[in-house]
Amino acid sequence: MPLPNELRLRSADHADLPHISELRESVGWGVHQWALHAVLEPPDARCFVVVDRADRLIGVGSGIAYGALGFVGNMIVDGDHRRRGIGSVILEAVIDFLVGRGATRLELSATDDGRPLYARQGFEPIGPSTIVRVPRRFARLAADVEVSDAGPAAVAELAAYDAPRFGGDRRAILGRMLSDPDRPVIVARRERQIVGYGWVRPDDERIGPLVADSPEIVTSLVGEAFDRLPSADRLSLNLPPDNHAGAERLAALGAELESWDGRMTRGPQVPRRDETIYGNAVGALG
């Protein structure tokens, strides 16, 4: 479907970030500036906007590719311009970009209003993910690991650990995380080998990404995160649909679970270990 004559599609740049932030706020989404910067970074990320003749931004969508695994995010159209095919044009541009980068498996987090749009492009629901809220009283189980700051020099080691579990190469995002002084990356090691890591995010009282080889290691990382955030009463995680066992184990230790049925995918699954994933970054980045 072509755009109306007065509108055009273009790639976003950093000057568009304030307006993209406003669109996110208009639909009740948080503004993660670090994540918005990440979807502007070539060659594996691209953000598209639709603007009117005055270059006012009225729609946005982004894609980021981690090899064969790609994520669609930031899909918003201004409320006064919906039902005009704008979302479809943006989504097609994002999909074309991701496929062009070699992504064969596409994933996204869908709102109720957005699901019909994604379904027309071949996306299907994959079952509910689990929002986990961990209270401070959460027990630390013996995991026989050492937890410490990862540090910027750990990017290659961390990427090598993360890729087979997540299903794609997140080296660029991990590098951005490791260089952020306000949000520490903590890493669990056993006999000097990484067995888990988490990104502590004080602004959201959240850990994510959080990847670990067992629930016991998760409790060590969460406990360390609480030590770093003395004012936080609880921390949030977001588990993928296929980590039911991990969610049940965390619930048995005192976490609160909330089901959220918004994950949709297109294309064959990539090799990954969902049972090790206990928290994503944000929906637009995986």
Image: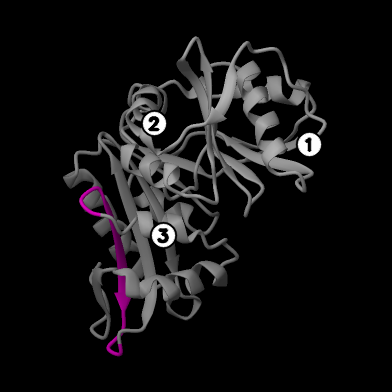
Distance (Cα) linking label 3 and label 1: 29 Å
Q: Name the residue under label 1.
A: 135
**Residue 89, how many percent across, how many down?**
28, 64
Distance (Cα) linking label 2 and label 1: 29 Å
Q: Residue at image x 48%, y 48%?
A: 283
Of the numbered discs 2 and 1, the one sitting upstream in the chain is 1
Of the numbered discs 3 and 1, the one sitting upstream in the chain is 3
Q: Residue at image x 75%, y 46%?
A: 232
- Amino acid on which disc 3 is placed: Leu
| Secondary structure type for disc 3 | helix
- Amino acid on which disc 2 is placed: Ala
| Secondary structure type for disc 1 | strand
Query: Of 72 and 112, which appears nearest the observer?
Result: 72
Q: Quadrant of residue 91?
A: bottom left
With respect to residue 274, does 107 lie above or below?
Answer: below
Q: Give the range drawn in magenta.
A: 42-54
Distance (Cα) linking label 2 and label 3: 24 Å
Q: Which mark is residue 154?
A: 2
Given the current orientation, which residue lies at the most extreme right position?
A: 137
